[in-house]
Image (spheres, coloured by chain):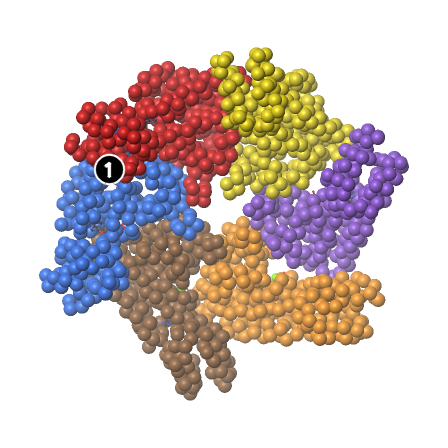
Chain colours: A yellow, B red, C blue, D purple, E brown, F orange
Amino acid sequence: DFEMAMINDIKPAFGVSSESVERYAMNGIVNWGQPVSDVLENGKLVLQQTQESNRTPLVSLLMEGPPGSGKTALAASLAAESGFPFVKVCSPEDMVGFLEGGKCNAIKKIFEDAYKSQLSCVVVDDIERLIDYVPIGPRFSNLVLQALLVLLKKNPPKGKKLMIIGTTSRRDVLEEMEMMTVFSTHIHVSNITKGEHIINVISELDSFSEDEKSTLAKKLSGKKLWIGIKKLLVLLEIVRQADMDVRIPKFLTLLEEEGGLQA
Amino acid sequence: DFEMAMINDIKPAFGVSSESVERYAMNGIVNWGQPVSDVLENGKLVLQQTQESNRTPLVSLLMEGPPGSGKTALAASLAAESGFPFVKVCSPEDMVGFLEGGKCNAIKKIFEDAYKSQLSCVVVDDIERLIDYVPIGPRFSNLVLQALLVLLKKNPPKGKKLMIIGTTSRRDVLEEMEMMTVFSTHIHVSNITKGEHIINVISELDSFSEDEKSTLAKKLSGKKLWIGIKKLLVLLEIVRQADMDVRIPKFLTLLEEEGGLQA
Amino acid sequence: DFEMAMINDIKPAFGVSSESVERYAMNGIVNWGQPVSDVLENGKLVLQQTQESNRTPLVSLLMEGPPGSGKTALAASLAAESGFPFVKVCSPEDMVGFLEGGKCNAIKKIFEDAYKSQLSCVVVDDIERLIDYVPIGPRFSNLVLQALLVLLKKNPPKGKKLMIIGTTSRRDVLEEMEMMTVFSTHIHVSNITKGEHIINVISELDSFSEDEKSTLAKKLSGKKLWIGIKKLLVLLEIVRQADMDVRIPKFLTLLEEEGGLQA
Amino acid sequence: DFEMAMINDIKPAFGVSSESVERYAMNGIVNWGQPVSDVLENGKLVLQQTQESNRTPLVSLLMEGPPGSGKTALAASLAAESGFPFVKVCSPEDMVGFLEGGKCNAIKKIFEDAYKSQLSCVVVDDIERLIDYVPIGPRFSNLVLQALLVLLKKNPPKGKKLMIIGTTSRRDVLEEMEMMTVFSTHIHVSNITKGEHIINVISELDSFSEDEKSTLAKKLSGKKLWIGIKKLLVLLEIVRQADMDVRIPKFLTLLEEEGGLQA
Amino acid sequence: DFEMAMINDIKPAFGVSSESVERYAMNGIVNWGQPVSDVLENGKLVLQQTQESNRTPLVSLLMEGPPGSGKTALAASLAAESGFPFVKVCSPEDMVGFLEGGKCNAIKKIFEDAYKSQLSCVVVDDIERLIDYVPIGPRFSNLVLQALLVLLKKNPPKGKKLMIIGTTSRRDVLEEMEMMTVFSTHIHVSNITKGEHIINVISELDSFSEDEKSTLAKKLSGKKLWIGIKKLLVLLEIVRQADMDVRIPKFLTLLEEEGGLQA
Amino acid sequence: DFEMAMINDIKPAFGVSSESVERYAMNGIVNWGQPVSDVLENGKLVLQQTQESNRTPLVSLLMEGPPGSGKTALAASLAAESGFPFVKVCSPEDMVGFLEGGKCNAIKKIFEDAYKSQLSCVVVDDIERLIDYVPIGPRFSNLVLQALLVLLKKNPPKGKKLMIIGTTSRRDVLEEMEMMTVFSTHIHVSNITKGEHIINVISELDSFSEDEKSTLAKKLSGKKLWIGIKKLLVLLEIVRQADMDVRIPKFLTLLEEEGGLQA
Ligand SMILES: Nc1ncnc2c1ncn2[C@@H]1O[C@H](COP(=O)(O)OP(=O)(O)OP(=O)(O)O)[C@@H](O)[C@H]1O
Ligand SMILES: Nc1ncnc2c1ncn2[C@@H]1O[C@H](COP(=O)(O)OP(=O)(O)OP(=O)(O)O)[C@@H](O)[C@H]1O
Ligand SMILES: Nc1ncnc2c1ncn2[C@@H]1O[C@H](COP(=O)(O)OP(=O)(O)OP(=O)(O)O)[C@@H](O)[C@H]1O
Ligand SMILES: Nc1ncnc2c1ncn2[C@@H]1O[C@H](COP(=O)(O)OP(=O)(O)OP(=O)(O)O)[C@@H](O)[C@H]1O
Ligand SMILES: Nc1ncnc2c1ncn2[C@@H]1O[C@H](COP(=O)(O)OP(=O)(O)OP(=O)(O)O)[C@@H](O)[C@H]1O
Ligand SMILES: Nc1ncnc2c1ncn2[C@@H]1O[C@H](COP(=O)(O)OP(=O)(O)OP(=O)(O)O)[C@@H](O)[C@H]1O
Ligand SMILES: [Mg+2]
Ligand SMILES: [Mg+2]
Ligand SMILES: [Mg+2]
Ligand SMILES: [Mg+2]
Ligand SMILES: [Mg+2]
Ligand SMILES: [Mg+2]
C-alpha cells in the first residue's frame, strides 16, 4: 500500500522537514511490487550499517535506474525515514544557472554542514545534472565532478558518521568517469515491467471504479511492458480527464505508445 | 477559417497582452487542414490537464516541426488562448547578443515570475536559439541547456500549477541532449503537404479573385508538395505584386522552386 | 553602361550618404552583361515588396558569389538606390580587432537604429568576416552567429518595415550553419565567364585606344574564362602602366594566369 | 599482526601528528601477507637513502596500485614512521572545489614549507585527483600537472633533503604524461589475491568467533580472488551486522560478487 | 653586387629610418642570381602601380618562401627603397608575449597611422608569428587573423594610397585560411639552388682569398643544393673561424650536411 | 676526470654565480667518454663564434637528448665556463605554478636583461616544461611557445651579442612546432651505452674499493646498455647503502632492471 506512513513518520530534524521531502516524493511511494520492497529494504540496511559500525564512518550508496523510475523519490524517502539528525537533499533544482564554481560551493557547503552533525545523510540527487553532463561532446563540469569524487571518499571528522545517497540515470557515464568504484555500494531502481505492477498501482489510487479495475486486471494480466512510475502517473492523470466510457481503452492505447505494452 | 477570434478572446493577464501575442502570430492562425485542427485540439487538452489535475502540477509540451511550419505562432496562440493568469513567451528575440549567463538569468527570471502565479503558462520558444546551437562542432551553451533541463522537471511551489510549451526545429538534437525524455509529451507541427491545403489558405486570404481561385484549385487538386506556412505567405505576397495575368503561373513556378510541387 | 547614375540618384537619408556608398562601390557598377542586369532587377523587386506589403514587414535577401565578384558593391548600390529613409552598411571594416561582444553590440545597435525608421535597409556585409569564420577548425564566433540568426528573423516593431541584404562568399558554410533557411530569398552574383563580358568592361573604361579595343575584341570573342570584376579591374590597372605596344599581349597573359583564359 | 605499533611510534614533528595520520590510515595497517611486508621494507630503504646520501638530496617514490588497495594508508604510515622533522600529506581532500590556481598554490606552499626543514617527507596523495583527471577527454589540470612535473625534480636548497611519496591508481596515465620517468623509483601496492590473505586479515580483527574462523579457513584455503583491503573491510563490517548463523555464507556470497572468489 | 646602395638611398621618412631597416636586413641584399633580381624588379613594379593608379588605391603583395630565404630582408629593403612618406614594419619582434588583443591593437595602430599619410607602405612580417600559428592543432589567434583578413582588403580613406607587403614561410597555411585570395598579388622568394649562386655570394664577401675562391668555384660549378641565404651566411661565419688550410673542406662538409650538396 | 675545475674557473659575472650553476650541475661533469668530450668541445666552438663574429650577433644552440642524460648540467656548465659578462639560466624551476602570462614575462625579462650586456649567454632549460607541454592532447602554452619562437630569432640591439642554449628531451615535438629550423645549430647529448663508460664513472667516484672496481670492470667490459648519467648516480647511491658483500651483485641487478644491461 501507499507508504505515506513512512513519510509522515519523519522526526523533526536539522536541515530537513516533511515538507521538503514531499517536494521530492510528491506522490508518495506506491509499493507496486517486489523491486520496490527490495530497494527500501536494502537501503535501510545500509542506513543501519552507517549508524552502527565504527570501522566504516562513511558509507555511500548509489541508486541508479532509467529516467522517471522513481530514484529521487526513493532516495528522499529513505533519507527522511532514517531519523538521522541531519538530512539534506543536494539538488540541481536549487542551483539553476549556477556557474560551476557556485555549484561546487553549494555542494561543499552541504557536506560541511553534514560534518558538524554526529550522524548525517546527504542525498546527492541527479548527478548528471549536478555535473552539467550532456552526451554531445560529451561536456560536463570537471570542477564539480572532481569535487564529488573527493567528497564521496573523504571521511567525516573523527567520531562523526555520514551516509551519502547518490542518484543517476546514467550508470554507464559514472563508470567511465571512475565514480562507480568510489561508491561503497549501489542499488538498481527498475521500471515497471509487468501488467501486475500496473494493477497494483491502480489499486492504490482512487482514479478508477471497481468495474474498471477488474476489466484492466484481465487485459493486463501476464503482459510485459516498460514504463517508469513517473510517466505512469501522468498517463493515469490524462485518462482521468476523459469520459468514463473511453477511459480504459484510452489508457491501454497510451500504455502501448509510451510503455511498450504489446497490443 | 481564420482563427483570429481565438486571439481576440484573450482575457487581460499579467505578463501577456494581445499585442505581444500578435508579435508571434503576426498573420493569425489559418486552419488549412486537419493537422492544424489536431495541434490546436491536443494542445488544449494538455492545458486542461494542467488546470485540473492535482497530481501533475507541472506539465511540459514540446511542439516540434520543420523551420517555418508555424510552431511559434501556434504555441503563442495556445498560451494566449489558455486564459491562465500568467502567460509569457521566453524568446531569443529578447536576448540578442546576451552571453550565456545573461540568458540563464533572463530565463530563470521568467520561471520565478511564473512560480508566483496560481496557474502559469511559459512558452520556451526556439530552443536551438536559446541554447545557441549550431551544427558545426556542434556548439551550444551548456549553461543554458542545463538550466532548461532542470527547469523542465522542477515542480512549481506547493499549490501552484505550471504548463511549459517548448518549440524546436531540431527534435533530433533535443533527443541527443536527452531533453526529449524530460518533456511530459510532444506534438508534431507539420508542413503543408497537399494542394488542397494551399487552396484552403488562399480561400482565407483576400489576395486572389474568384476566377484565379478556381483555376488554382484545378491545377493543385491532388498534388503533393512540402512547404511551411511561413514561406507560403511570403510567396503569396510576392505574387500579389505581379501583374494580374501572370499571377497564377508565377505562383505555380515559385511553388515548384520553393515548395517541391511537381510541375 | 556605367550605372554611376544610380549612385548619384541617392536621396539624402539618415545613416547613409553618397560618399559612404562610394566607399563600398569605389569603381561604380559596370553593367558587363545579363547577370549584372538580373541581379539589379531582382534586387529592386525585393526592395519593392518590402515597401509595399503589409503581411511581410521583414524581408531578407542574401547575395552570394565568389570572392571579388562584386557582392559588396552591388549590395551597397541597391541599398543606396532604395531611397529608404534609413540605409546602413554593417561592415567588418568598422570592427577590426573587436572582440565578439563588441561586434554583437555594434551589429545590434545598427538594427535598433533601423527599427526606429518607418522603412529601413541594412546591408550585413561579408558574413564570414562578421562571424570571424576560418575553415581551419572551423572556428567562428558563435555569439555573433546566433545574434545574426535571431536578427534575421525578428520582425521590426508594429508598423515598421525592414529589408536586410546579406553578402557572403561561402554559401556552403551558411548552409551548414542553418542560416540559409532564415533568409527570405537569395541571389547569385557571378564571376565574369565570357570574352564578351570583358569587352563590355573595357568599353566602359577609358584605358584602351579604339585600335586596342578591336584587337582585343577579336582575340576574346567566344572565349571562356572565370574572373571576378574586382581582380579584372586590378589587371587592367597593371596593364595601363605598361608601354603602349605590350599592353594587349601583357593583358592576355595576365588573363591566362589569373582568369583561366585558354591561350 | 596489526602494525598499530608503527603508528604509535611517531615522534612529535612539525606539520604532522599521529592524529592526522590516523585520518589517512583509519584502520591501521594489517600485515596480511608478503606484499605488505615488501612495500614497508622497500619504503623504509628509500627513506634511509634520503637521510644518508649527500649526492641525492631529492628522492621520489611512487606507490601505485588498484583503487582501494591501501596506497594512501601505506604512504601516510611510511611518512609518519620516518621520524623526519617535517612530514606532510598533500591531499585533494583539503582542496575540494579549488580552481587549478588555488591547487597549485596549496601544493607549492607545502613544498616551500618542506624546503625549510633539514629533512622532509611530502606525500603527494591521489595524483589523479590532484590534477583533476577524468578519462573522458581526457581532461585534467595541466597547470597542476606541470607544477608537479617540475617539483618532482627540483632539488631542495643546498644542504636540505627531501623525500616525496606519490600515490596513484592510474600508472598508465602517469606514463602517458611522462611523469613516470621523473620519479626516482616506484613500488606496486597489490590487491589481496589469495584465500590465505583473507584469513590473515580476519585473524587480526575481532569480528569472528574461533569456530567461524576455522570454517572460513577451510572454505578459503587455496582459493584465488582479487579485492582491495578497503573494500574487504567494508564487507566484513556488513557481515558483522548480520545474524550469527548467516555470517559465514553471507560473507562468502559477498566475496564472490565483489571479490571475484570462485564459488 | 651588394645592393647596400639601395639601403643607403633611403630618404628620411616618417615612421622609418635607415637604422630600423638595417635591423631587418642586417647583412644587406647580396644579388646572388636571377631570382633576387626578379624579386626586386617585380616588387618595384607593384610599388609603382600603387603610387600611380587612381582606381587601385590599395595594393597588397605577399612574399612567400622557405624559412631563412631572405623574405624579411627583401620586404624591408623594398619598403625602405620606396621613398613613400610613411614606411613601417609590423613585426612580431615588437610584440613578444602580447596577448591577442594587444597584438590586434598594435597592428591596427600601424594601419591607422598609415591611413594618415598620402602614400604609405606597411610590411606585415612573418604572418605565422603574428597570428601565433603552430601546426599542432593547429592553433593560432583567430582574432589577429580576422583583423588581418579585413585590413588586407580595407581601402585607405579617399585620396590616400597604401601598399601592404606580407611575408610568410607557410603559403599553404595562408591558403587554408583563405588569405591568399585577399592579396592582390604574390612573389616567391627562393632558396639558393646552384653552386654558381654560392660563388656569387662568396665573391661579395671578403671572407676568402682569391685562391680559395677559385678552388671553390671548381668544386661547386654545376652542383645542385638547397639552402637559404640566412643559414649560408652562418656557415660562412663558422668557416671563417677555422684554420686557413681546413676552411674549404670544412665549408664543403657543412654544405653537404645543411644544404643538401651532393658530395 | 671530474671537470669540477671547469666550474671553479667561473669568473664573477652579473646574473650568475658559481653557486647557482652548482644548483644545475650538482654532481659536476664526469667525463665518462668521447660523447661528453664532443659536447663540451662543440659547445665551446659555438661560444667562440658568438664572441668573435660581427655578421652573426645571435647564435642559438639546442642540446637535445633523453631524460636524465645530463643536458641541464652540460648547458649550465658551458654557460658558466663562457666567461661572458651576463649568464643566466631561464628555468621552469623558478616558475612553478605560473600562468602562461607570468611565464612569458619572466622569460622576456631575462632576454631584456641579456640585451643590456655586450655579450650574453642565456640557457633556456627544459623547453617542454617552459611551454607546459604534455603529450595527451597534446597541450602546451602557445603564448610561451610563440614568445620563444620570436626570441630565438630576434637579433640583440646593434653592437650586442647573444648566445642562447636550449635544452629538450623531445626533439620530435620541437620539430613539429617548427622550432628546430629556428635554432642555428644543435648538439645531441647521449645516454651511457657501454660498459666502459660505467667503469669510467665509477673510477671518478670514491664509492667502490679497488677490488670491486676490477670485478666490475671484468663483468661490464664490452657490454651494451642504455642509461642516463642522472639515474646512474642514483643507482650508485643506493648500492652504497648496501652491505659490502652484496654491493656488486646488487648494482648489476639494478643495471639490468633500469639500464637495459643484458644479464
Ligand atoms: N514506488 C515508487 N517509487 C518511486 N516513486 C514513486 C513510487 N510510487 C510513486 N512514486 C512517485 O513517482 C514519482 C517519481 O518521480 P522521481 O522524480 O522520483 O523519478 P526519478 O527517477 O528521480 O526521475 P528523473 O529520472 O527524471 O530524475 C514521484 O512523484 C513519486 O512520489
Ligand atoms: N495554421 C497556421 N499555423 C501557424 N502559423 C500560421 C498559420 N496560419 C498562418 N500562420 C502564420 O504563419 C507564420 C508562422 O511563422 P512562425 O514564426 O510561427 O513559424 P515557425 O515554425 O516558428 O518558424 P521558425 O522555424 O523560423 O521558428 C505566422 O506569421 C503566423 O501568423
Ligand atoms: N558590375 C559590377 N558589379 C560589382 N562591382 C563592380 C561592377 N562593376 C564594377 N565594379 C567594381 O568592382 C569592385 C567590386 O568589389 P567588391 O568589394 O564589391 O567585391 P566583393 O565580391 O564584395 O569582394 P569580396 O569577396 O572580397 O568581399 C568595386 O570596386 C566595384 O565598384
Ligand atoms: N595492509 C594494509 N595496507 C593498506 N591499508 C590497510 C592495510 N590494512 C588495513 N588497511 C586499512 O585499509 C584502508 C585502505 O584505504 P586507503 O584509502 O589507504 O586505500 P587507497 O588505495 O588509497 O584507496 P583509493 O584508491 O580510493 O585512494 C585504510 O583504512 C587502512 O587503515
Ligand atoms: N639576396 C638576399 N636576399 C635576402 N637576404 C639577404 C640577401 N643577401 C643577404 N641577405 C641577408 O640574409 C639575411 C636574410 O634573413 P631574413 O631574416 O630576411 O630571412 P627570412 O626569410 O625572413 O627568415 P625567416 O624565415 O626566419 O623569417 C639577412 O641578414 C639579409 O641581410
Ligand atoms: N658528463 C655529465 N654530463 C651531464 N651531467 C653529469 C655528467 N657527469 C655528472 N653529471 C651529473 O649528472 C646529473 C645530470 O642531471 P641533469 O639534470 O643535467 O640531466 P637532464 O638531462 O637535464 O635531466 P632532465 O631530462 O630530467 O632535465 C647532474 O647532477 C650532473 O652534475
Ligand atoms: Mg530524479
Ligand atoms: Mg519559431
Ligand atoms: Mg565584399
Ligand atoms: Mg588513496
Ligand atoms: Mg623573416
Ligand atoms: Mg634538465
In the displayed structure, D65 sits above or below A93; it is below
Whether residue F88 can be seen here: no
Along the line of sight, the residue nearer the viewer: E232 or F192: F192
Is residue D208 left or right of A251 when viewed as pictured? right
Along the line of sight, the residue nearer the viewer: B203 or F131: B203
Name the secondary structure under disc 1: helix
Name the spot of residue A66 as percent of width and height, x first. 58, 32
Q: Residue furthest left?
A: C210
Which quadrant would residue C185 be assigned to in this image? top left
Name the spot of residue D4 as percent of width and height, x first. 83, 43
Whether residue D127 can be seen here: yes
Which quadrant would residue A16 be assigned to in this image? top right
Along the line of sight, the residue nearer the viewer: F47 or A52: A52
Quadrant in the picture for the C terminus of chain C: bottom left
Name the spot of residue F147 as percent of width and height, x first. 48, 57
In the rendered image, which residue does mark 1 sit on? B253
Q: Residue furthest bottom?
A: E211
| Residue for point 20% across, 51% down | C27
| Residue for point 65% across, 42% down | D92
* Callout 1 crowding tier (Cα within 10 Å): few <14, some 14–19, many ≥20: some
